[in-house]
Amino acid sequence: MKNKIIKTNHGIVTAPFFMPDATRGLVKFLSTEEVAEAGIKALVVNTLHLYLEPGLAIIKKAKGIHKFMNWDGPILSDSGGYQVFSLIHKNPKMGKITDRGAIFRSPSDGSEHEITPEKAIQIQFDLGVDMMVCFDDCPPNEYSREDIAKAVERTIRWAKRCKIEYLRQLKKRKIPDAKRPLLFGVIQGGAELDLRERCTKELVKIGFDGYGFGARHVDKEGKFLDKVLKFTADLIPDDKIKFALGVGLPEDIVRCYQMGWDIFDCVIPTREGRHGKLFFHKKNSPLLRGVACRRGMTGCVKDFYETINIGNSRFASDFSPINSKSKIPELRDHTKAYLHHLFKINDPLGARIASLNNLEFYSELMDKIKNGLK
RNA sequence: GGGUCGGUGGCAGAGCGGUCAAAUGCCCAUGACUGUAAAUCAUGUGCCUCACGGCUACGAAGGUUCGAAUCCUUCCCGGCCCA
């Protein structure tokens, strides 16, 4: 399996790579310098969140999202499809989805907004990102087959509109081909293979730089949808970027990589870090030794990493370094007992250090699988 | 010295005759988190028992009552007010 090279307006990155979610223009609790220090190459921001706050006027004045958040590497913007729909599915009062687009209320002030496929693309151009994502209809996998099928058709229609708007914006903004941002379609279809197939084929007809796996990749019980992920990855042309949106746990990333998925984003390292869970490579990790697990990583997932909850009382007087092997001085020089203390008194420094640790773990994980699982 | 209000679980603080092992919040313990409106959320938290159930508890000691954290008496401790 060849590792793809992705050229963007803000640098070249080699897949596979992991992008932390900087949804609102930041990786929570971290500065962009710290994110880079953890080995992160690219970030994901969210169209919708940035559109609401601080709003496009500010971002335009700042001359784009890169300058605004002081991140010079590649940035991918998620379209906001997932957010609008999870908002509405959680609470139907929060909005309405029609063929035209989605009308929703801002959770922060209740104000009403509409986002259409065209508008989502316009916003992403205004943000000035390197990779953008089509606005999609993203129902939960538990919905009926009929509902999922409807969402697939709508996602396809919307993808066409996104592509048209994308081409229109390129022309209007006089962006040369070499400078154009990449555009990704999103494949829906829940756990129904034939729907995934239909969606993929239709999106490929429209033509995108990459294709994302939409909706969740695990079922209600958190069980990984192996078949669906593999099936879908195989349908996407190999010269296109395969984006596993929202993936995931370390073992899920490894599995997806083996299936052919190239790029990943997830809240896990940062959110769980904020909640006190730290990820570490295991001493005899097959990944650290550069050895691939022949049966697929699923068979030896438990062998390659471990987590701790730093809030557990057993760390109150554990004076070992947080991570003696880290490249980040703070993680080598601070003890677990100190980090435990920071969490106990709920100081943001704890969330920061834990996020840093987990991002470094994810970066190293990506390097290991890049080198070890070819 | 006189008056007055109060003393409840690790802390704060409800309860003011039975449905009270005692609200609620915090602390504490454990868990969850997968295209982030989650620095969040869930569960547990007197003791014994797998459980049914039992035991000990609302400052202390007595008392009233079928029954008291809740009423009465005395004592101890604290706040405030008056001398």
Image: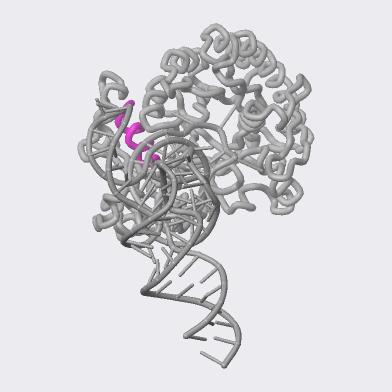
* Residue A189 lies in quadrant: top right
Please provide percent x and percent y for residue A183: 62, 29
Main SS of residues in magenta: helix
Q: Establish if A8 lies above or below A159.
A: below
Residue in the image at 66% along x and 41% along y? A49
Colour scheme employed for the rendering of this structure: one colour
Q: Dividing the image into 4 quarters, which one contains the N terminus of chain A?
A: top left
Please provide percent x and percent y for residue A360: 38, 46
> What stretch of residues is rendered in magenta?
A361-374
The front one of A136 and A369 is A136
Residue in the image at 73% along x and 45% along y? A109
The front one of A8 and B65 is B65
Residue in the image at 61% along x and 20% along y? A139
Whether the magenta-drawn stretch holds residue A372 is answered as yes
Q: Establish if A327 lies above or below A232.
A: below
Q: Residue furthest top?
A: A194
Is residue A323 rendered to the left or right of residue A48?
A: left
Q: Is residue A4 visible?
A: yes
Q: Dividing the image into 4 quarters, which one contains the C terminus of chain A?
A: top left
Residue in the image at 47% along x and 50% along y? A35
The front one of A122 and A359 is A359
Q: Is residue A11 visible?
A: no
Whether the magenta-drawn stretch holds residue A237 is answered as no
Please provide percent x and percent y for residue A362: 39, 40
